Amino acid sequence: MTASHAMTAAQGAAQDEPEGKYLYAIIGAPAPTKFEAAGIGGRGDLVHTLSVGPLAAVVSDTPRIEYDSNRRNMMAHTKVLEEVMAGCTVLPVCFGSVAADIEAITNKVLIERRDELMLQLGMMRGRVELGLKVSWREDVIFEEVLDENPAIRRARDALIGKSPEKSHFERMRLGEQIGQALERKRVEDEQRVMDRVRPFVHSAKLSKPIGERMVFNGAFLVEADREPELDACVRAMDAEWGNRLTFKYVGPVPPYNFVSLKIHW
C-alpha cells in the first residue's frame, strides 16, 4: 500500500469516529476568535477559541481518535502553538489531547482548573522559552584529553602497531580512562556555560546531554525584554569558544519545559 493510500485509509477510518475537540493550549481572554494555521488531522479544520471568563481554550474539531506522534501531526500541533504564542501568553497542552465535546473543555479545564491556569499564565506572562545545546568539536576535544592526561597519551601510543586481538584489555582500559576524562570535562564545560547565561535567565531546566559530544542541554525561561542580552551572551560564547564547541540556540518556543499541563478527561 502506498503512503497516499495509507493516508486515505486512515482518514476514512477517522471519519467513522464521533467528532470531538482537539485542545492545543490555554490563553487569557479576551482572545482572538480564530487563527490561520489549520487544525491537526489534515482536514483543514478551523483553529478557534472557546472562552469562559478570563480564560480561553485554543481548539479545533477532530475525530475522537488517538493521534500518532508522527512528524505530520507534531508539525500541525506545533504550527498552531507558534501562531498563538506570537500574540498571546500561552500554556501549551500536551500533544494528543482530544475532548469529547465543548462541555468537557469548559467544565474540566476552564472552570475546574481556573485558579491553577490563571496562576500559570501569570508566571509565563512577559516571558519566553529559549533552548541551548552545546557540543564538543570531536577532533579538538580528543586532543585536549591527550594534552591534559599524559598517561592516557602514553597508553594510546603504546597500542600503536598492536593487533586489536592481542590488546583487547588494554584498549578497554584506555576507553574507560578516556570516558572518565571526558565526563570530568563535560561537568566543567556545563558549569562554564551555565555561569555565563545565569545572569540573563529567570529560570533554567537542564536535561541530560544526548550522545557523547553534547555537554549542555538546557532550556531557559527568560524575560522577553532580556532576550537580546541572552542572544548576545550566546554569540559571545561562540566567538570565544567556537574553536572547540558548537552552539545550537533556538526560540522562542512554546514553554513546555516550564508548563506541565496534562488534561485527564
Image: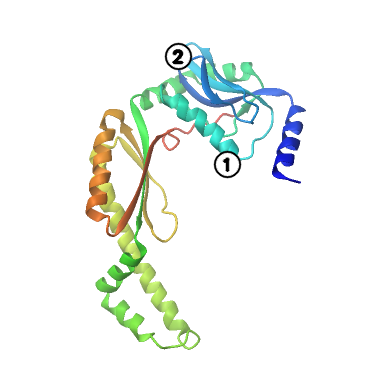
Name the element at disc 1. Answer: helix
Question: Image height check: is 40 above or below 107?
Answer: below
- Read off the residue under disc 1: 71
| Quadrant assignment for the C terminus | top right
Which amino acid, mark 2? Ala
Instruction: Find residue 123 and report its image quarter.
Output: top left
Q: Position of residue 251 (x, y in %)?
A: 38, 37
Question: Image height check: is 193 above or below 125?
Answer: below
Which amino acid, mark 1? Arg
- Read off the residue under disc 2: 29
* Disc assigned to residue 113: none
Q: Does residue 94 appear in the picture of this structure? A: no
Spatial separation of the CA atoms under disc 1 and disc 2: 31 Å
Q: Residue at x 28, y 47 (%)?
A: 194
Q: Position of residue 131 (x, y in %)?
A: 37, 42
Q: Residue at x 33, y 83 (%)?
A: 157
| Other-residue count near label 1 (Cα within 10 Å), few / some / many at <14 / 14–19 / ≥20 | few
Q: Position of residue 109 (x, y in %)?
A: 55, 21
Q: Position of residue 76 (x, y in %)?
A: 56, 33
Q: Is residue 24 left or right of residue 45?
A: left
Q: Residue at x 35, y 80 (%)?
A: 156
Q: Is residue 5 left or right of residue 226?
A: right
Specify which label sits upstream in the sequence, 1 or 2.
Answer: 2
Name the element at disc 2. Answer: loop
Q: Residue at x 31, y 56 (%)?
A: 245
Instruction: Find residue 99 and report its image quarter.
Output: top right
Q: How is the image coloured?
A: rainbow
Front residue of 132 and 239? 239
Question: Image height check: is 58 above or below 223?
Answer: above
